[in-house]
Amino acid sequence: MTVLELIETGAKQLTEAKVAFGHGTLNAFDEAAWLVLWRLGLPIDSPLDGHDSVANMAVTIRDQALVATLFNERIQTRKPAAYLTREAWLQGVAFYVDERAIVPRSLIAELLADGGIDPWLTESTRHVLDLCTGNGSLAVIAAMVFPDIEVTGSDLSTDALAVAHINVAKHGLTPRITLLQADGLNSPELQARGPFDLIVCNPPYVSAKSMAALPQEYLAEPQIALDGNTLGSQDGMDFIRALLVAAPAHMSDPAVLVLEIGNEREFFEAAFPNLDPIWLTTSAGQDQVLLLTRDTLLDGMGLPMGYETTPGAGATELRQVNSPEDWDTFNTLLQEYADKDLANPCHSSIWQDIEHLPSRYHANQGGVAVLIYHSGQLAGCGALAATARAGLVEIKRIYVRESFRRQGLASAVTLDLLQAAQQLGYTHVGISTWPHNTQALPLYRSLGFTPIEPFKDYPHGTLIYLGFPLSTPATSGSHLPS
């Protein structure tokens, strides 16, 4: 048999087996060509027509058997071809890949390579963040395209980062690319490297409906990199909600965020109706990758805390209250909260809290209390308290000291309390606040909280009740250090 005959035979097998494509190829012939050429040790870009074509090259019986075994493995395991060859190509660049990271295929690579983002960059663009870096492909391509920039790649998965390290070293970019383990933007080490002039992100965004319909090839990949419903939503936007609230505090004034959302534009627009993104044109159309300026994020996410202070001015740490000394500190913050921030102090339960700490915020009562530190200084607090409604815990006592406001700390502690509630096994988180609380309400809504029925009796006025559904048990623990 010739090379071309092997490819055509393999393509027929793949078609009849109804394998799914999308991990570097879009059809049976291209995937068959990839597998045949790789198995025969020929360059992947070997021509199949013209004077230097390999199409008519004869293949030995032994090599035919090796090719047949490879096709059988592809069909039987339904693993993406890249996991079998341990190599994937993106914008002509070769990357090592295995089952620890998803196969690189981000459309953002096109935009980096062909200059599709360049009109929004400036001469001051020096620090680039590849958030959810996976196997490091976007970080590597960004460093290749912009030889004068410094790149940070981050991912929650240590397995994916191990693959990324291989690729950074493979392309000789270790001096220019720093890889960090981080849960979104919630990492002191990552925050200390900001502010960033460009953030690119191909996050987990697949909706629950789309997840249920994924072919086996996609289920062979780490689901943490795909499933956008880890906090209980159906729209795939859980990670993105947290990202869009937190991002402005880590962006320089002219910075932009480039975000891939695949086929989930409908869900994105429903989740963020006040955002006005710029949709970028790629080979897949004009509805899968979007660009947001820092100003657009501030306006569209309804962030009244403003973020006017210098972004990236310090690292934030959220610490769970455990020791008697910590409870004394928490008590001090509650006293400040009561003295400065309460609209109706005589009707507030905060006085009972102060008198009986730790009370309902203790772990034995199903609660949690948190201290916020920023650049090593005590900045505020927050807490969880169990309610009479089974499975529902209430977020309480979010307080940020005046000198630390407008830096995203309230959103950071709210997001971390959601993670803590999930880890404790709750199914829902509730918040109650005053209708005139014009700072907190837009923040909670931007994080995905929606109106719910009252979960407690309050005889002294009208409260607004908001809720957030959680998935349990937690797929990963809270990142609160104890």
Image: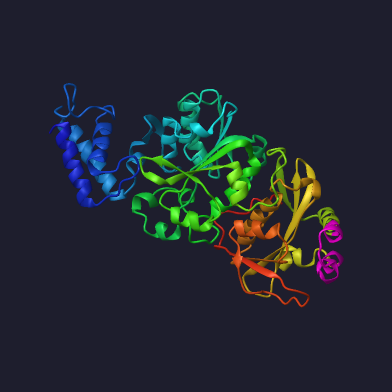
Q: Residue at position x 22%, y 40% from top?
A: 29
Judge whether residue 236 can be spotted in this image.
Answer: no
Q: Is residue 250 left or right of residue 375?
A: left
Q: Do we see residue 254 in this rendering? A: yes
Q: Which residue range is magenta in the image?
A: 335-355
Query: Magenta: predominant secondary structure element?
Result: helix
Give the side of residue 76 with respect to residue 375, left or right: left
Question: Who is closer to the viewer here, 2 or 343?
Answer: 343
Compared to 471, does 83 lie above or below? Answer: above
Look at the image and tell me in which quarter the N terminus lies. Answer: top left
Q: Where is residue 154 in the image (x, y as percent from the top left)?
A: 56, 39
Q: How many marks?
A: 0
Rendering quarter of residue 462: bottom right
Residue sitting at x 60%, y 27%: 124
**Where, by quadrant of the figure, is residue 238 drawn?**
bottom right
Residue at screen point 41% across, 35% down: 110
- Of all residues shown, which one is farthest toward the top? 51
Who is closer to the viewer here, 147 or 222?
A: 147
